[in-house]
Image (spheres, helix red, strand yellow):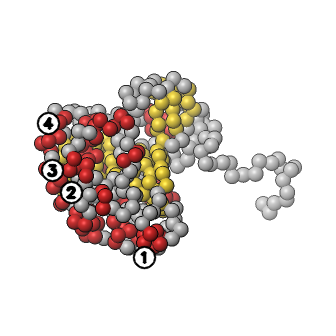
Amino acid sequence: MLESVQNYYGKILESSSDLKTSACCDISSMPDWLKPLLAKIHPEVTEKYYGCGLVAPHLLKGCNILDLGSGSGRDCYVLAQLAGAEGEVIGVDMTPEQLDVANRHLGYHAEQFGFANVSFKQGYIEQLDELGLPDNYFDIIVSNCVINLSPDKDAVLREAYRLLKPGGELYFSDIYADRRLPDAVRNDEVIYGECLGGALYWNDFENLARRHGFLDPRLVEDRPLEITDPAIAAKLGTARFFSATYRLFKLDALEPACEDYGQAVIYKGSIADAPHQLLLDKHHLIETGRIFPVCGNTWRMLQDTRFAEHFDFIGNFDRHYGIFPGCGGALPYTETTPSEAPGACC
């Protein structure tokens, strides 16, 4: 399957217009504040871009960033501008034709930006240990519609966790299914190359993330995909697919559930591109200056990461109040007094 993907993206596709579905490309999700950075990217790099969603979180200045499946380098060159001269961006891709495009324009972008902070490595995202990348080195690891193409997603998440600094995050967009797909669909080369065959069932993905140390996966944004190619739609049947962006923090102290400790945060509005509100994830849009109650995990995601200086923190972990309201968990027991309850075998 790796050879099939290499062939599809290296030889069959000439540009994003050759794709049969929109699963891997969605320029509409690019926010306005990123568009001036995209305008500085060489046209050939942009033309060979096959990504989905958005992989540019806030606060990247001075960060060490790794892009898994960097392709033609489009996202690397956007992230390089955000990281600045003090930061570093490394792209990893297995497809020689894509890397040729990325490397061909290193000098062009260094001239555009006024500094050179990007490099590319040929290799497999399942075998990052063979590339000499150091443990606990990267502040951010990103990936744009690539992990679904990997035949060994366990290895990808395991290696990402190893390479991240404590408090770092894996921030990536990918394709997910509403069910487990049959083998005939998963092994179809075109469907796989179109980022659908390798799409994980969303619940399997979240369990996989937890198994590799990312204990509280946070969904940032999502959109349903419309399969417009009749032949592909016929093979997929009633399965539904979604493009989604997740952030996975490397924080050992995170708990399996959202626990309530009576804590709150106040966002200072000090992030340049988010003066009025900060979107941490789909359920946490935090307004500037407003006291915002949070669970213990969200508290740690803000206090123990690069976000800390942009918040004031209220409370601590001294007293526990159970599951945080509205976070999907609930007391599993019947709340009745013994006199109201029916007879029981125990």
Q: Secondary structure at mark 4?
A: helix
**Cα separation between marks 3 and 1:** 37 Å
Question: CA gap, disc 1 to disc 2?
Answer: 28 Å
Separation (CA) of disc 4 from disc 2:
21 Å
Q: Are marks 3 and 4 in contact (CB under 8 Å)?
A: no
From this view, report whether residue 255 is shown above or below residue 229: above
Q: Position of residue 228 (x, y in %)?
A: 44, 63
Task: Tell whether label 2 touches label 4 (CB within 8 Å).
Answer: no
At a point 34% along the width and 72% down the height, the residue shown is 189
Judging by the rendered image, the residue that carries numbered circle 1 is 184
- Which percent across, then down, holds residue 294? 55, 35
Q: CA distance from mark 3 to mark 4?
A: 14 Å
Q: In this orientation, does residue 17 appear?
A: yes
Of callouts 3 and 2, which one flags the residue occurring earlier in the amino acid sequence? Answer: 2
Precedes in sequence: disc 4 or disc 2: 2
Instruction: Indicate the secondary structure of the residue bearing disc 2.
Output: helix
Q: Which residue is mark 3?
A: 103
Q: Residue at coordinates 47% horizontally, 59% vertically from top-left?
A: 226
> Is residue 58 rendered to the left or right of residue 259?
left
What residue do we see at 46% from left, 57% from top?
225
| Residue 56 image offset from top left, x and y in percent | 35, 41
Comparing 9 with 82, the one in front is 9
Quarter of the view holding residue 93: bottom left
The disc label shown at residue 98, or none: 2
Between discs 4 and 1, the one toward the N terminus: 4
Mark 3 Cα within 10 Å, few/some/many (few <14, many 20+)?
some
The amino acid type, in three-letter code, at marker 4 is Glu
Is 294 above or below relative to 138? above
- Measure how far apart labels 4 and 1 are at the Cα level: 48 Å
